[in-house]
Structure formats: C-alpha cells, structure tokens
Image: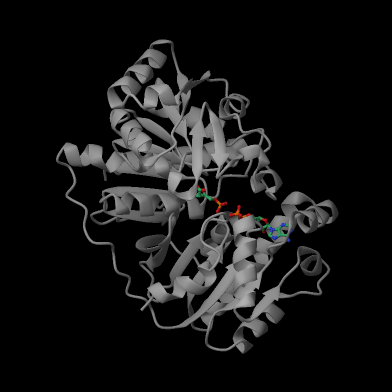
Amino acid sequence: MLLGAIADDLTGATDLALMLAREGMKTVQVVGTPPSGFDTGDAEAVVVALKSRTIPAAEAVSLSLEAAHWLLAGGARQLIFKYCSTFDSTPEGNIGPVSEALMELLGAEVTIACPAFPANKRTVYRGHLFVGDLLLSDSPMKDHPLTPMRDANLVRVLQAQTKVPVGLVARDVVSEGPQAIRSSFAAAASDGPRMLIVDAIENDDLRAIGEAASDMKLITGGSGIAIGLPENFRRAGLIGGRGAPARLATPAGRPVILAGSCSAATRRQVAAAIAAGLPARKIDPLAIADGSETPAEVLAFIQAAGEGPALVYASADPAAVADAQEKLGRERAGSIVEHLFAEVATALRDRGYTRFLVAGGETSGAVVQALDVKALMIGPEIDPGVPWTLSLGDEAPVALALKSGNFGTDDFFLKAWTLLS
Ligand SMILES: Nc1ncnc2c1ncn2[C@@H]1O[C@H](COP(=O)(O)OP(=O)(O)O)[C@@H](O)[C@H]1O
Ligand SMILES: O=C(O)[C@@H](O)C(=O)COP(=O)(O)O
C-alpha cells in the first residue's frame, strides 16, 4: 500500500476511491478499520470508510487514529483525511479535531484543507466555498438535517474547530503552479504547525496542489484533492499507467432504491423516479416513531412491487425535516430512519435482493453496516463521485451504489441500472 485514506462517511469514501481508481491506482475500500492482517491484495491505495462525521469529536478522533495506525502498519506513505466537499461539520468538528490528531500522530508541521471538487461544482476562492453559483451558506446545505452549513468562510469555520492556526493559500499562488504552492507550504511550516485552506476552482489547480503536496504526510479535503496524488507515485515509478475501468461481475438478483438523503439533488431524483412510474413509498420518522410504519410493511411493499427497482424514501423538504426534528430531536429523527433502512436492507438481502442503490452518506453507512459488508471493489462511474461497487469477500456478493446526497443527475435512480450487466 502506498496511499492510505480515512473517510468520515461511506459515500465520501466511495467518492474518493473512485477518484483514485480513475487516476490509475489499484484501490480497495474497507468498511471500518479491519483487523490487523486483513488482506488488501495488491491494492496501492486503501480507503477506510468510517461513520464519524457527526459523532462526538473525541470518538471521531479515536476511530480515525485507529484507522491511521492500521494504514501505516500496512505500509501507507501518505495519508488523506477525506471529508465532504461541502465541508459538512458541526461547530465542534469533526474536521478540525481529526486533522489535528492526525497531524500530531504523523509529526506533520503543515497540512492542507481543500474540499474543492469542480466536477461537482464545489470550488474554493479566497477561502470561501461555493456550491455552483452560491456561497455554501446560501446553498441548500444551510438546511442539512445533521450538519447545517451557515458560514462559507472556511478559514473561520475550521479555525473554530481547532487550536492549530488556520491560514490560506489563495488562488494567486495556486495559479503560479506547484513550485509556488510548495514554497507557500514551506513558509507556513517554518512558523509552526499550520492548517492551510487552499483555493481551487478547476482540476488543473487540484493537480498542481497534488504535485506540490507530494511530500506532505497528511492531506485533507474532498475527493478532488486526490486527483493529482497518483501522478506523484507514477512519477516515482511506483505505480503503472491508467488501466481500463474495472468491470463488475454483477450478481443476479433483484434491485431496490433506499433514499435517506434530504438533499435538494436527492429530492429531485425522487421526484423524477416517481414521475417515471417507479413504485415508490414515502416513509416518515414520525410514523416510524409512533409505530404506524414498520419495517415489515416496507418490506412487503418492496416485494410486491415487481421485478424492477422499487423506491423507498424518507427524503423530505426542510420544513418537514424541521418538524420531525422538533418532535423527535435531531439525532433520533435521523437514527430512526437509518435503523428502518438497515433492517429492511438486511431482510431484502436474505430474500435474494443483490442490487442496492442507497442515497445519503449516513444512510449508506447504516445499510452497509447492517449488511455486514467488509470491503468494496470500485466499478463503473454512474456520475462524478458515484460508482457501482461490489462487496468483496462475501459468499453472496451484493452490488451497491452509494450516492452522496448532493451528487447525481435528476435521472440517477433510473439510469444507474443500465451500467449493470
Ligand atoms: N424526513 C426526515 N426527517 C428528519 N431526518 C431525516 C428524514 N429523512 C431522513 N432523515 C435523516 O437525515 C439524515 C440524512 O443524512 P445522509 O444520509 O448523510 O444524507 P446526505 O448524504 O444528504 O447528507 C439521515 O440521518 C437520515 O436518517
Ligand atoms: O465530498 C462529497 O461531497 C461526498 O463525497 C460526501 O462526502 C458526501 O456526503 P453525503 O452528502 O453525506 O453523502
């Protein structure tokens, strides 16, 4: 293993693994930190998927350190801490505390923090994060059920989460290329530990940043920050050229769509699927809480829906989410939905379902944990940041498309299936 990554949620891990695979590294994604001795085969990059984005900071730090120790023991020469391209975090973290702990572990004087992912319209300019044409704080992320993002100034957001001084490498420097960027890292390091937000508005910026960071022990950011890293290993003669994208041996079996994301993109995808005539059932946290909606009923609906994919969705608009959270509490409203999806997914797998399309990072984490999937092979890209994957090491493998809430075109739930044989 050359490159080790720790991702704070499952869809984020898949997004990063796809990026590394596309850039020519043999990449495996594992779910949680595996036991020592776990075989990652000939993987050149390994991404550990955690579910640590919204848990208490101390727990996130401890899980991330455990993953880091495992990756280092496996030979990783450089670590990436992958978080969301919309910098999803709470005022307490967990981006700051985890980055700080990993810097300490690695003895890193300086690290970068760059969530830019231009293919999905996330750009950073003058330290401010844009989602398409909107500042993060004006985007639908301001209403996220678990991590509402109300400030687009990343220097300020990150500084509130860490005692390590946070600085900025602005686009003026980035556009001068790898040499200038590297000099700005060195200047920051000479002043003591630093976290640097780095501007990037296009892939060429990210490739230049990647080249400049070839010697950096820890790199943090969205999947975009990884775009230039495989080339460093290729230049050093450590990896081969870019191969053809992996083909998945898709298991025979029935398909289902489980959507727990309330993002604007997922809600559009739900609407498009319903408009196209997919059998669909909406579930509501309040109904689950009072017992009027049960996993058994949801299961019966899916099984009765026929051979094509049925859709079960909790996706709701910000007013409905706020109402559920007011009555149940933010955490319980989320976990009650996640538990239902987890239970339904397990029952479906036991009944021969093998193709799962899951929308939402936390939701995917809950489903994959329930299915007891230990590792994933990355398959064809459905849309930027979202591949089909195949569970590894299972007697009865399942195909999983784990969709980040905000990713994918409106017809994602319809078109994804065409990539499976
Ligand atoms: N109707 C709802 N009301 C409140 N919370 C909800 C509702 N539907 C889903 N949730 C919760 O919102 C969270 C969405 O997070 P996640 O699955 O990570 O989606 P995303 O990828 O969009 O961030 C999950 O915890 C999910 O259970
Ligand atoms: O970086 C991204 O945007 C994604 O990889 C990601 O982390 C998304 O998280 P969710 O929106 O919670 O799925």
Q: Residue at x 46, y 24 (%)?
A: 196
Name the quadrant of the N terminus: top left
How far across and down, in percent of the image, does residue 330 sit? 75, 50
Count of picture labels: 0
Decide if residue 395 is on the left or right side of residue 299: left
Note whether residue 304 is visible.
yes
How far across and down, in percent of the image, does residue 333 sit? 75, 57
From the viewer's side, name the closer residue of 382 and 233.
Answer: 382
Give above or below for 269 relative to 128. Answer: below
Q: Residue at x 63, y 81 (%)?
A: 279
Residue furthest to the top: 191
Decide if residue 170 is on the left or right side of residue 157: left
Give above or below for 328 relative to 303. Answer: above
How far across and down, in percent of the image, does residue 135 sit? 61, 37
Decide if residue 340 is on the left or right side of residue 371: right
How far across and down, in percent of the image, does residue 52 sit? 56, 45
Give above or below for 263 relative to 88. Answer: below
Name the quadrant of the C terminus: bottom left
Note whether residue 33 is visible.
no
Q: Residue at x 23, y 54 (%)?
A: 42
Residue furthest to the left: 237
From the viewer's side, name the closer residue of 29 and 14.
Answer: 14
- Coloring applied to the structure: one colour
From the viewer's side, name the closer residue of 141 and 216.
Answer: 141
Q: Residue at x 40, y 83 (%)?
A: 252
From the viewer's side, name the closer residue of 229 and 29.
Answer: 229
Residue furthest to the front: 133
